[in-house]
Amino acid sequence: MAENLLRGQLEACLAALSSTASPATLRAYRLDLEALAAFLEKRDVCDAARLDVGLVRRFLGAERSRGLAPRSLARRRAAVSHFAAFLVKSGLLEHNPAELVPTPRQGAHLPKPLDVDQLARLLDTPHDGSPLSLRDQAMLELFYSSGLRLAELAGLDLDDLDSRRVRVLGKGGKPRQVPVGASARSALETWLQARPTLAADGEPALFVGARGARLGHRAIQKRLTEVARRRGLPEHLHPHRLRHSFASHLLESSQDLRAVQELLGHANLSTTQIYTKLDWQHLAASYDAAHPRARRRRADSTDP
């Protein structure tokens, strides 16, 4: 019975999270919190109200000893912190003990954007004009035009689309409005004309599948992969790659980090700053290729 109490508390937290989080986030947090529950049960802690700083530290230490990477440890801590915050809100804890445990340090992961010209060729490649192809083109254009996350695009309804902007629900249920570029607007208008041939009656989703219902996350990923392969892209394409490309290309052109932060829906500027490092890599490569003194042969430096 006591063990069921802890598991029930965990399920209540995940049920509350499901109303705002993407399916991927929910799956990840379930995995993390089930690991925490197993750790606590082995120590006869069967009520989350006993969670404290010492237990959180020992749990993360045990996970580190098992060989979990810093990135995975950081996610474990985030899940525990979310669970503890839920317990505080439920009156089972007075404070969040995970807040007193620092996030494991991890190296910056620099995304690899697609080349501007390469991406332009991909988007401009003609297709067969079928309703599914028109839908895929609209999704591609919107991903790159507005820097949307996969869950944000999948969750779009018809009412979320305006003439020049789109309203999305970001991480944590935070809403934001993002501009839609001319190419994306054109592709969306064409798709909307074809959408009635696929959509079921009363279906509110902007993007639907062949059966007329909302297109799911995996279906979107699969379609993007297939389209990229058909159009001759030599690299794997996934939605987050288009989001990376959107951010990197915009930052390279505008140098406005705050604007890019707002468009991406990042809560912290530090999350967006990773793209400044990416931009520096691009500038450094251009310098090495173009500057006369950067292109000197190594042997030249030994000449008198």
Image (tube, rainbow, N blue to C red):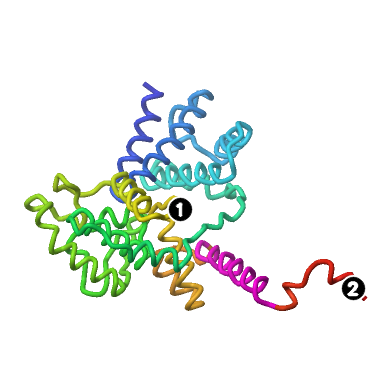
Q: Position of residue 110 (x, y in %)?
A: 56, 57
Which image quadrant is residue 54 in? top right
Q: Quick one: which residue is furthest to the left in this view? A: 201
Disc 2 marks a residue whose amino acid type is: Asp
Res 245 label: none
Relative horizontal placement of residue 137, taking residue 263 as reference (left or right): left
- At horizontal 85% and vertical 71% (from top left) the residue drawn is 301
How far across and how far down the image is residue 278, in percent?
Answer: 56, 64
**Marks 1 and 2, the one that precedes in the sequence:** 1
In the picture, measured across the screen, residue 86 lies left or right of residue 131, that is: right
Label 1 element class: loop
Residue 161 percent location from the top left of the image:
21, 67
In magenta, the rendered stretch is: 271-291
Cα separation between marks 1 and 2: 43 Å
The secondary element bearing badge 2 is classed as loop
Residue closest to the eye, 79 or 190: 190
User: From this viewpoint, is residue 283 visible?
Assistant: yes
Instruction: Say which of 227 and 244 sits in front.
Output: 227
Location of the N terminus (image quadrant): top left
* Residue beneath disc 2: 303
Q: Nearer the viewer, residue 266 or 153?
A: 153
Residue 150: give x, y in percent of width and height: 34, 53
- With 205 as the anchor, is 80 left or right in this view? right
Task: Relative to 285, say whether 153 is above or below.
Answer: above
What residue is pinned by disc 1?
A: 234
Q: With respect to residue 166, does 57 lie above or below? A: above
Q: Does residue 255 lie above or below 155 as drawn?
A: below
> Does the magenta portion include 64?
no
Q: Inspect the image, locate mark 1, and give the three-letter code of the amino acid beneath it.
A: Pro
What is the chief secondary structure element of the magenta stretch? Answer: helix
